[in-house]
Amino acid sequence: MEQHNHYTQDAIELLCRLIATPSTSRNETEAADLMEQTLQGYGFATQREANNVWAVDTAFDPARETILLNAHIDTVKPVKTWTRDPFIPTIEDGKLYGLGSNDCGGGLVTLLQVFRYFCIDHAELARPFNLVYLASSEEEVSGQEGIVKALPLLPKIDVAIVGEPTGMQPAIAEKGLMVLDIIAHGRSGHAARNEGVNAIYEALDDMVWIRDYKFPKVSPLLGPVKMTLTVVNAGTQHNVVPDTCTMLVDIRSNEHYTNEEIFDIVRQNLRSEVRAHSFRLHSSHIDPDHPLVRRCLQLGLTPYGSPTLSDQALMPFPSFKLGPGESSRSHSADEFVKISEIEAAFDTYIALLS
Protein backbone atom coordinates (compact mmCIF):
# COMPACT_ATOMS: atom_id res chain seq x y z
CA MET A 1 0.00 0.00 0.00
CA GLU A 2 1.91 3.06 -1.23
CA GLN A 3 0.15 6.03 0.35
CA HIS A 4 3.29 8.01 1.22
CA ASN A 5 5.05 10.35 -1.29
CA HIS A 6 4.37 13.97 -0.21
CA TYR A 7 3.06 13.02 3.24
CA THR A 8 6.23 11.23 4.27
CA GLN A 9 8.38 13.83 2.55
CA ASP A 10 6.68 16.51 4.64
CA ALA A 11 7.07 14.32 7.75
CA ILE A 12 10.81 13.90 7.18
CA GLU A 13 11.30 17.61 6.45
CA LEU A 14 9.51 18.54 9.68
CA LEU A 15 11.50 15.96 11.65
CA CYS A 16 14.74 17.47 10.34
CA ARG A 17 13.60 20.90 11.53
CA LEU A 18 12.67 19.47 14.94
CA ILE A 19 16.07 17.79 15.34
CA ALA A 20 17.69 21.15 14.60
CA THR A 21 15.52 22.76 17.32
CA PRO A 22 16.87 21.58 20.70
CA SER A 23 13.93 20.50 22.86
CA THR A 24 15.18 18.70 25.94
CA SER A 25 12.50 18.30 28.61
CA ARG A 26 11.28 21.63 30.05
CA ASN A 27 12.97 23.48 27.16
CA GLU A 28 10.47 22.76 24.38
CA THR A 29 9.11 26.22 23.61
CA GLU A 30 10.71 26.56 20.17
CA ALA A 31 9.72 23.04 19.14
CA ALA A 32 6.15 23.68 20.34
CA ASP A 33 6.15 26.89 18.28
CA LEU A 34 7.23 24.88 15.26
CA MET A 35 4.49 22.29 15.76
CA GLU A 36 1.90 25.05 16.22
CA GLN A 37 2.98 26.83 13.03
CA THR A 38 2.98 23.57 11.06
CA LEU A 39 -0.54 22.63 12.18
CA GLN A 40 -1.80 26.12 11.34
CA GLY A 41 -0.08 25.93 7.96
CA TYR A 42 -2.12 22.82 7.16
CA GLY A 43 -5.32 24.69 8.02
CA PHE A 44 -5.95 23.56 11.60
CA ALA A 45 -7.06 25.79 14.45
CA THR A 46 -4.56 25.05 17.21
CA GLN A 47 -4.82 25.15 20.97
CA ARG A 48 -1.92 25.33 23.40
CA GLU A 49 -1.32 24.91 27.11
CA ALA A 50 2.28 25.43 28.24
CA ASN A 51 4.24 23.60 25.50
CA ASN A 52 1.47 21.13 24.67
CA VAL A 53 -0.04 21.83 21.23
CA TRP A 54 -3.16 20.18 19.82
CA ALA A 55 -5.84 20.42 17.16
CA VAL A 56 -9.32 18.90 16.95
CA ASP A 57 -10.94 17.18 13.97
CA THR A 58 -12.24 19.72 11.44
CA ALA A 59 -15.44 17.65 11.21
CA PHE A 60 -15.77 16.97 14.93
CA ASP A 61 -19.07 15.31 15.83
CA PRO A 62 -19.76 14.85 19.56
CA ALA A 63 -21.96 11.84 18.75
CA ARG A 64 -18.92 9.90 17.50
CA GLU A 65 -16.14 8.27 19.52
CA THR A 66 -12.84 10.15 19.56
CA ILE A 67 -9.35 8.77 18.94
CA LEU A 68 -6.35 10.68 20.29
CA LEU A 69 -3.16 10.63 18.21
CA ASN A 70 -0.35 11.55 20.60
CA ALA A 71 3.43 11.78 20.67
CA HIS A 72 5.88 13.95 22.58
CA ILE A 73 8.16 16.74 21.39
CA ASP A 74 10.76 16.66 24.16
CA THR A 75 13.99 14.66 24.15
CA VAL A 76 16.45 13.47 26.75
CA LYS A 77 19.81 15.26 26.93
CA PRO A 78 22.37 13.84 24.48
CA VAL A 79 24.81 11.33 25.95
CA LYS A 80 28.53 12.08 25.66
CA THR A 81 29.27 9.22 23.26
CA TRP A 82 27.56 10.79 20.21
CA THR A 83 30.00 10.69 17.26
CA ARG A 84 28.05 13.36 15.33
CA ASP A 85 26.29 16.59 16.27
CA PRO A 86 22.95 15.45 17.79
CA PHE A 87 21.27 18.66 16.59
CA ILE A 88 22.31 18.42 12.95
CA PRO A 89 19.87 16.14 11.05
CA THR A 90 21.78 13.86 8.70
CA ILE A 91 20.41 11.30 6.26
CA GLU A 92 22.83 8.49 5.42
CA ASP A 93 22.05 5.07 3.94
CA GLY A 94 18.33 5.58 4.44
CA LYS A 95 18.70 6.55 8.12
CA LEU A 96 17.87 9.96 9.59
CA TYR A 97 20.26 10.66 12.46
CA GLY A 98 19.60 13.20 15.21
CA LEU A 99 18.49 13.53 18.83
CA GLY A 100 14.81 12.61 19.15
CA SER A 101 14.60 11.13 15.65
CA ASN A 102 13.59 7.73 17.04
CA ASP A 103 12.12 8.76 20.42
CA CYS A 104 9.76 9.86 19.36
CA GLY A 105 10.10 12.22 16.41
CA GLY A 106 9.21 9.55 13.88
CA GLY A 107 5.86 8.90 15.50
CA LEU A 108 5.24 12.60 16.16
CA VAL A 109 5.59 13.69 12.53
CA THR A 110 3.97 10.60 11.00
CA LEU A 111 0.85 10.83 13.17
CA LEU A 112 0.60 14.50 12.20
CA GLN A 113 0.49 13.52 8.52
CA VAL A 114 -2.16 10.89 9.27
CA PHE A 115 -4.22 13.57 11.04
CA ARG A 116 -3.80 15.86 8.03
CA TYR A 117 -4.70 13.02 5.62
CA PHE A 118 -8.03 12.31 7.31
CA CYS A 119 -9.06 15.75 8.57
CA ILE A 120 -7.92 18.08 5.77
CA ASP A 121 -7.25 16.17 2.54
CA HIS A 122 -10.02 13.59 2.97
CA ALA A 123 -12.36 15.46 5.29
CA GLU A 124 -15.29 14.69 3.00
CA LEU A 125 -15.01 10.93 3.63
CA ALA A 126 -17.46 9.48 6.15
CA ARG A 127 -15.73 8.31 9.33
CA PRO A 128 -17.21 6.66 12.42
CA PHE A 129 -14.76 8.49 14.71
CA ASN A 130 -13.24 11.89 15.46
CA LEU A 131 -9.50 12.50 15.63
CA VAL A 132 -7.54 14.76 17.98
CA TYR A 133 -3.81 15.32 17.47
CA LEU A 134 -1.69 16.23 20.51
CA ALA A 135 2.03 17.02 20.53
CA SER A 136 2.83 16.89 24.25
CA SER A 137 5.81 18.02 26.31
CA GLU A 138 7.86 16.88 29.32
CA GLU A 139 7.19 13.20 28.59
CA GLU A 140 10.75 12.14 29.38
CA VAL A 141 10.46 13.55 32.91
CA SER A 142 6.71 12.92 33.49
CA GLY A 143 6.59 16.66 34.16
CA GLN A 144 3.76 18.65 35.71
CA GLU A 145 3.72 20.98 32.65
CA GLY A 146 3.37 18.04 30.26
CA ILE A 147 0.39 16.05 29.04
CA VAL A 148 -1.44 16.36 32.39
CA LYS A 149 -1.91 20.07 31.57
CA ALA A 150 -3.55 19.28 28.22
CA LEU A 151 -5.71 16.22 28.93
CA PRO A 152 -8.45 18.06 30.90
CA LEU A 153 -8.81 20.55 28.03
CA LEU A 154 -9.36 17.96 25.26
CA PRO A 155 -12.72 16.65 24.09
CA LYS A 156 -13.73 13.37 25.71
CA ILE A 157 -11.22 10.76 24.47
CA ASP A 158 -12.27 7.13 24.01
CA VAL A 159 -8.91 5.62 23.01
CA ALA A 160 -5.38 6.84 22.25
CA ILE A 161 -2.66 5.77 19.83
CA VAL A 162 0.72 6.83 21.22
CA GLY A 163 3.51 7.15 18.65
CA GLU A 164 6.39 5.75 20.71
CA PRO A 165 8.93 3.58 18.81
CA THR A 166 7.58 0.02 18.85
CA GLY A 167 8.77 -1.32 15.49
CA MET A 168 5.15 -0.64 14.42
CA GLN A 169 3.90 -3.51 16.58
CA PRO A 170 1.12 -2.63 19.06
CA ALA A 171 2.28 -2.43 22.68
CA ILE A 172 -1.10 -3.07 24.32
CA ALA A 173 0.21 -3.04 27.90
CA GLU A 174 2.92 -1.02 29.60
CA LYS A 175 4.59 -1.29 32.97
CA GLY A 176 4.02 1.46 35.51
CA LEU A 177 6.58 3.01 37.84
CA MET A 178 6.69 3.84 41.52
CA VAL A 179 9.74 4.92 43.52
CA LEU A 180 9.77 4.32 47.28
CA ASP A 181 11.86 5.84 50.06
CA ILE A 182 12.50 3.24 52.76
CA ILE A 183 13.81 4.62 56.07
CA ALA A 184 15.10 2.35 58.83
CA HIS A 185 15.49 4.04 62.22
CA GLY A 186 18.01 3.21 64.94
CA ARG A 187 19.81 5.04 67.72
CA SER A 188 23.35 6.40 67.47
CA GLY A 189 26.12 5.32 69.81
CA HIS A 190 29.86 4.66 70.01
CA ALA A 191 30.96 1.72 67.87
CA ALA A 192 33.53 0.64 70.51
CA ARG A 193 30.87 0.10 73.13
CA ASN A 194 27.75 -2.05 73.13
CA GLU A 195 25.36 0.85 72.75
CA GLY A 196 22.95 2.32 70.24
CA VAL A 197 20.72 0.55 67.73
CA ASN A 198 22.35 0.05 64.31
CA ALA A 199 19.93 1.25 61.62
CA ILE A 200 21.76 -0.82 58.99
CA TYR A 201 21.03 -3.99 60.96
CA GLU A 202 17.44 -2.83 61.40
CA ALA A 203 17.20 -2.57 57.61
CA LEU A 204 18.72 -5.95 56.73
CA ASP A 205 15.56 -8.04 57.01
CA ASP A 206 13.69 -5.46 54.94
CA MET A 207 16.39 -5.61 52.26
CA VAL A 208 16.09 -9.38 52.11
CA TRP A 209 12.28 -9.16 51.81
CA ILE A 210 12.59 -6.62 48.97
CA ARG A 211 15.06 -8.92 47.21
CA ASP A 212 13.04 -12.11 47.61
CA TYR A 213 9.34 -11.16 47.55
CA LYS A 214 7.39 -12.22 44.47
CA PHE A 215 4.07 -10.51 43.74
CA PRO A 216 1.64 -13.37 42.96
CA LYS A 217 -0.24 -11.87 40.00
CA VAL A 218 1.86 -12.31 36.85
CA SER A 219 0.82 -10.67 33.57
CA PRO A 220 0.93 -12.71 30.33
CA LEU A 221 2.06 -9.51 28.57
CA LEU A 222 4.22 -7.76 31.16
CA GLY A 223 5.36 -10.59 33.40
CA PRO A 224 5.73 -10.08 37.16
CA VAL A 225 5.94 -6.84 39.10
CA LYS A 226 9.66 -5.99 39.32
CA MET A 227 10.93 -4.56 42.61
CA THR A 228 14.59 -3.50 42.84
CA LEU A 229 16.57 -2.00 45.72
CA THR A 230 18.78 0.54 43.94
CA VAL A 231 20.27 2.96 46.53
CA VAL A 232 21.33 2.50 50.17
CA ASN A 233 22.78 5.26 52.39
CA ALA A 234 23.78 5.09 56.05
CA GLY A 235 26.43 6.21 58.49
CA THR A 236 28.65 9.22 59.05
CA GLN A 237 31.99 7.73 60.15
CA HIS A 238 33.55 4.42 61.19
CA ASN A 239 33.14 4.79 64.96
CA VAL A 240 29.53 5.98 65.09
CA VAL A 241 26.63 3.53 65.10
CA PRO A 242 24.27 4.87 62.36
CA ASP A 243 20.84 5.97 63.52
CA THR A 244 19.28 6.08 60.03
CA CYS A 245 19.52 3.90 56.92
CA THR A 246 17.72 5.20 53.84
CA MET A 247 16.97 3.15 50.73
CA LEU A 248 15.47 3.74 47.29
CA VAL A 249 13.31 1.06 45.69
CA ASP A 250 12.33 1.06 41.99
CA ILE A 251 9.05 -0.78 41.30
CA ARG A 252 7.75 -1.57 37.80
CA SER A 253 4.11 -2.63 38.08
CA ASN A 254 2.00 -4.77 35.79
CA GLU A 255 -1.65 -4.14 34.98
CA HIS A 256 -2.88 -6.41 37.82
CA TYR A 257 -1.88 -3.96 40.57
CA THR A 258 -2.40 -0.28 41.21
CA ASN A 259 0.57 1.53 42.71
CA GLU A 260 -1.49 2.08 45.85
CA GLU A 261 -2.03 -1.68 46.22
CA ILE A 262 1.68 -2.37 45.81
CA PHE A 263 2.51 0.35 48.34
CA ASP A 264 0.18 -1.25 50.91
CA ILE A 265 1.75 -4.70 50.39
CA VAL A 266 5.26 -3.28 50.87
CA ARG A 267 4.30 -1.22 53.91
CA GLN A 268 2.62 -4.20 55.61
CA ASN A 269 5.73 -6.36 55.20
CA LEU A 270 8.51 -3.95 56.17
CA ARG A 271 9.52 -2.72 59.63
CA SER A 272 11.02 0.42 58.12
CA GLU A 273 9.12 3.59 57.27
CA VAL A 274 7.83 3.59 53.66
CA ARG A 275 7.09 6.69 51.56
CA ALA A 276 6.08 6.85 47.89
CA HIS A 277 7.40 9.62 45.65
CA SER A 278 4.03 9.49 43.86
CA PHE A 279 1.28 7.07 42.79
CA ARG A 280 0.56 8.72 39.44
CA LEU A 281 2.53 6.53 37.00
CA HIS A 282 0.28 3.48 36.76
CA SER A 283 0.59 0.50 34.48
CA SER A 284 -1.65 0.89 31.44
CA HIS A 285 -3.37 -1.53 29.07
CA ILE A 286 -6.09 -1.89 26.48
CA ASP A 287 -8.52 -4.77 26.07
CA PRO A 288 -7.10 -7.23 23.49
CA ASP A 289 -10.63 -7.37 22.03
CA HIS A 290 -10.75 -3.61 21.38
CA PRO A 291 -11.64 -2.95 17.70
CA LEU A 292 -8.34 -1.17 17.05
CA VAL A 293 -6.36 -4.08 18.49
CA ARG A 294 -8.40 -6.53 16.42
CA ARG A 295 -7.67 -4.38 13.37
CA CYS A 296 -3.95 -4.59 14.20
CA LEU A 297 -4.25 -8.36 14.18
CA GLN A 298 -6.00 -8.26 10.79
CA LEU A 299 -3.04 -6.26 9.48
CA GLY A 300 -0.65 -8.97 10.66
CA LEU A 301 0.71 -7.03 13.64
CA THR A 302 1.69 -8.72 16.91
CA PRO A 303 0.56 -7.26 20.26
CA TYR A 304 3.08 -7.28 23.11
CA GLY A 305 3.79 -5.77 26.51
CA SER A 306 6.26 -2.91 26.92
CA PRO A 307 8.63 -2.51 29.89
CA THR A 308 9.21 1.21 29.21
CA LEU A 309 7.12 4.02 30.65
CA SER A 310 5.34 6.66 28.53
CA ASP A 311 2.60 9.28 28.88
CA GLN A 312 0.12 6.41 28.74
CA ALA A 313 0.66 6.15 32.49
CA LEU A 314 -1.18 9.48 32.84
CA MET A 315 -4.08 8.69 30.49
CA PRO A 316 -7.41 7.84 32.15
CA PHE A 317 -8.69 6.06 29.01
CA PRO A 318 -7.58 2.99 26.99
CA SER A 319 -4.41 3.45 24.96
CA PHE A 320 -1.66 1.57 23.17
CA LYS A 321 1.73 2.41 21.72
CA LEU A 322 2.36 2.04 17.99
CA GLY A 323 5.12 3.89 16.24
CA PRO A 324 8.08 3.76 13.84
CA GLY A 325 11.58 3.09 15.15
CA GLU A 326 12.86 0.73 17.81
CA SER A 327 12.79 1.23 21.57
CA SER A 328 16.36 -0.10 21.78
CA ARG A 329 17.62 3.02 19.93
CA SER A 330 16.01 5.44 22.38
CA HIS A 331 18.30 7.49 24.64
CA SER A 332 21.36 6.10 22.83
CA ALA A 333 24.25 7.78 21.01
CA ASP A 334 23.81 8.36 17.26
CA GLU A 335 20.04 7.82 17.50
CA PHE A 336 18.30 7.37 14.16
CA VAL A 337 15.03 6.41 12.49
CA LYS A 338 14.88 4.79 9.06
CA ILE A 339 13.12 6.64 6.26
CA SER A 340 11.51 3.32 5.30
CA GLU A 341 10.11 3.03 8.85
CA ILE A 342 8.34 6.38 8.53
CA GLU A 343 6.94 5.39 5.12
CA ALA A 344 5.72 2.02 6.39
CA ALA A 345 4.27 3.61 9.54
CA PHE A 346 2.20 6.09 7.54
CA ASP A 347 0.72 3.26 5.47
CA THR A 348 0.01 1.17 8.55
CA TYR A 349 -1.70 4.03 10.41
CA ILE A 350 -3.89 4.78 7.37
CA ALA A 351 -4.82 1.11 7.04
CA LEU A 352 -5.54 0.86 10.76
CA LEU A 353 -7.93 3.82 10.72
CA SER A 354 -9.52 3.29 7.30
Image: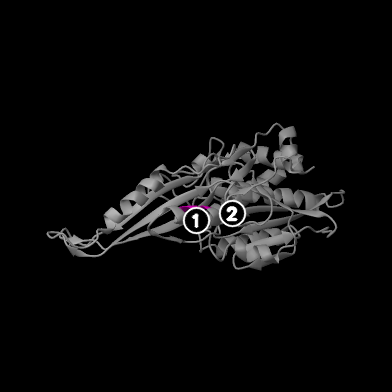
**Residue at 53% of width from left, 46% of height from top?**
308
Marks 2 and 1, how far apart at CA: 17 Å
Q: Position of residue 167 (x, y in %)?
A: 60, 38
Label 2: state its secondary structure.
helix
Q: Is residue 296 left or right of residue 16?
A: right
Q: Which residue is mark 2?
A: 313
Quadrant of the image occupied by residue 168? top right
Inspect the magenta stretch and tell me whether residue 181 lies in it.
no
Q: Residues within 10 Å of mark 2 (few under 14, many from 20)?
A: many
Q: Position of residue 84 (x, y in %)?
A: 43, 46
Quadrant of the image occupied by residue 270? bottom left
Precedes in sequence: disc 2 or disc 1? 1
Q: Position of residue 242 (x, y in %)?
A: 24, 61
Instruction: Please name the amino acid that badge 2 sits on.
Output: Ala
Q: Residue furthest front?
A: 194
- Residue 77 appears in view: no
Q: Which residues are magenta?
A: 262-266
Q: Residue furthest left?
A: 192
Q: Nearer the viewer, residue 19 or 102?
A: 102
Instruction: Please name the amino acid that badge 1 sits on.
Output: Phe
Q: Main secondary structure of the magenta part?
A: helix
Q: How is the image coloured?
A: one colour
User: Is the C terminus in the top left, top right, bottom left or bottom right quadrant?
Assistant: top right
Q: Which residue is mark 1?
A: 263
- Residue 109 appears in view: yes
Q: Nearer the viewer, residue 80 or 9?
A: 80
**Residue at 83% of width from left, 52% of height from top?**
123
Mark 2 or 1: the one toward you: 1
Label 1: state its secondary structure.
helix
